[in-house]
Amino acid sequence: MEQLIIFVVLLFLGYSFGRYAEKRHYRSILEREELLLTLPTTSRKKIGDDCRKVGQCELVNGSMVVSVDYFKRILAKLRNFFGGNVQSYETLVDRARREAVLRMKESCPDADMIINLRLETSSITKGKKNQVGSVEVLAYGTAIYFLD
């Protein structure tokens, strides 16, 4: 009985701290997205109708690796068994994607715009059963600097 109580307490603590860290990360993402809102980013390959001359272009990127915690893995296994959206992984990938785009934008704060935004994802497996251990998202694009 004592072992069961310890397991439940550890399970509760892990879940609580994980939720707290996730909410804190989302708050950070929202604040930084608001600050970088003035840097337009598009997946289009061309600048568009802008008549200004381009002074410089450079490849910019940002990446994020997020670990899949034990509790999300348990919830995902249950969801796979019963079917439906794996919401625990959806939030994980959403955070990684948004963080990667923010890191890309933060790498070129003086750019006028970023074009040709692309996102790549990959999973990092671990263990004998090749379980997903982490998810990496890479955001890359072309930073455009116009002449004044």
Image (cartoon, rainbow, N blue to C red):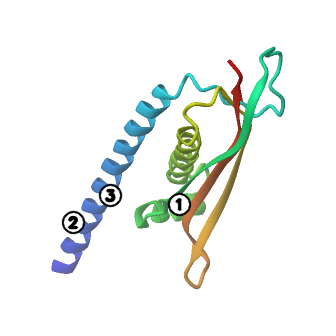
Q: Amino acid at mark 2?
A: Val
Does the CB distance between marks 1 and 2 fall below 8 Å? no
Please name the residue shown 82% across and 21% down the image: 48
Work out whether residue 1 can be spotted. no
Q: Please state which of residues 83 and 106 is positioned toward the viewer in this rendering.
A: 106
Please name the residue shown 50% across and 52% down the image: 88
Q: Amino acid at mark 3?
A: Tyr
**Residue that carries the numbered disc 2 in the rendered image:** 9
Q: Quadrant of the C terminus?
A: top right
Quadrant location of residue 32? Answer: top left
Please name the residue shown 64% across and 53% down the image: 138
> As displayed, is residue 56 above or below residue 63?
above
On residue 76, the disc is 1
SS at badge 3: helix
On residue 46, the disc is none
Q: CA distance from mark 3 to mark 1?
A: 14 Å
Q: Is residue 22 left or right of residue 60?
A: left
Q: Residue 58 placed where, x, y %?
A: 71, 42
> As displayed, is residue 61 above or below residue 55?
below
Q: Please tell me which of labels 2 and 3 falls first in the chain.
A: 2
